[in-house]
Amino acid sequence: MRKTLGAIALTAAAALTLVGCSSSAPAADDTETTAAAGEVTTLTIGASPTPHAEILQFVQDNLAADAGLNLKIVTYDDYVLPNTALAEGDIDANYFQHLPYFESQVAEQGYDFDHFEGVHIEPYALYSNKWESLDEVPDGAKFGITNDPGNQARALDLLVANDLITLKDTGDADPTLLDIDQNPKNFEFIETAPESLVRALDDVDLAIINGNYALEAGLNPATDSLLIESGVDNPYANFLAVRSEDKDDPALVKLDELLHSAEVKAFIEQRWPDGEVLPAF
């Protein structure tokens, strides 16, 4: 599952390799294992560029070596390929998703995955390039919203929490646009891929955008948004996901421990001081 390097190779192995999703990533099952003392275990982790890869980079630069780990980070710009790569064994774990999305993908795709506890929260937020406040937004405004079912429910919940719409009772099922009951401002909802919502801002009046895509585009959810999701009791913490067979792997358990360390919490708070990314522990 992973590559283990002897102490002699420590210097060469300790460098972080940050690979784009279009690059050829090293296969996670291409392994060499030694029992030598001081061995270093290389883990290949798929992640969104911001903030996930940045957090992993901090771990690699400051904590991994002392824990006997070396991280190779493969970045992905969408929400589909990281789980595909994990299922196919191209990576050892991924770090980009929250529980509702994880559960929807496991149910839809039949993945045999497990996960650790949440590391951070990226508050969902509502943005506009045309309006300074919600009071200015006219009836019938065009509203960009993700076509991803798990995150669409999250977006609708944000609107409900701020009295912009009401939803029908869907029981345990995630609500969709079809479940909108009352829409007082007659928003015209336009579905698009989550990674395209930033680019769509000039074509719509409003859009709810995933935190990682907002940050990558230079938008600060805490200061640039018209509405932002609360971090209190937030169920959308992002975590390390793994194949079920690897949940107890010592190297992955150690990585998760590092991601929940006081050092990582301090890094998140210092790197994103306005609360655009929040520790979940």
Image: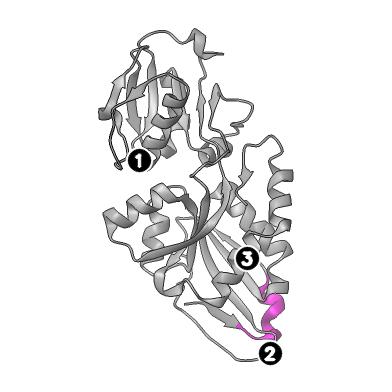
Examine the image and state in which quarter residue 214 appears: top right
First reached walking from the N terminus: tag 2 or tag 3: 2
Q: Which mark is residue 148?
A: 1
| Residue 111 seen anywhere in this rendered image of the structure | yes
Identify the residue position indicated by label 3 in the image: 257
Q: Which mark is residue 94?
A: none
In the depicted structure, whether residue 170 falls above or below residue 250 = above
- Decide if residue 12 is on the left or right side of residue 215: right
Label 2 CA crowd tier, 10 Å (few <14, some 14–19, many 20+)? few
Amino acid type shown at disc 1: Asp
Q: Depth check: give the residue in front, 169 or 117.
A: 169
Could you give the CA–CA distance between mark 3 and mark 1, rounded to whole angstroms? 30 Å
- Name the mark nearer the viewer: 2 or 3: 3
Please, what secondary structure does the residue beneath circle 3 have?
helix
Q: Are marks 2 and 1 in contact (CB under 8 Å)?
A: no
Residue 187: image location, x then y, percent: 35, 16
The span picked out in magenta is 5-14
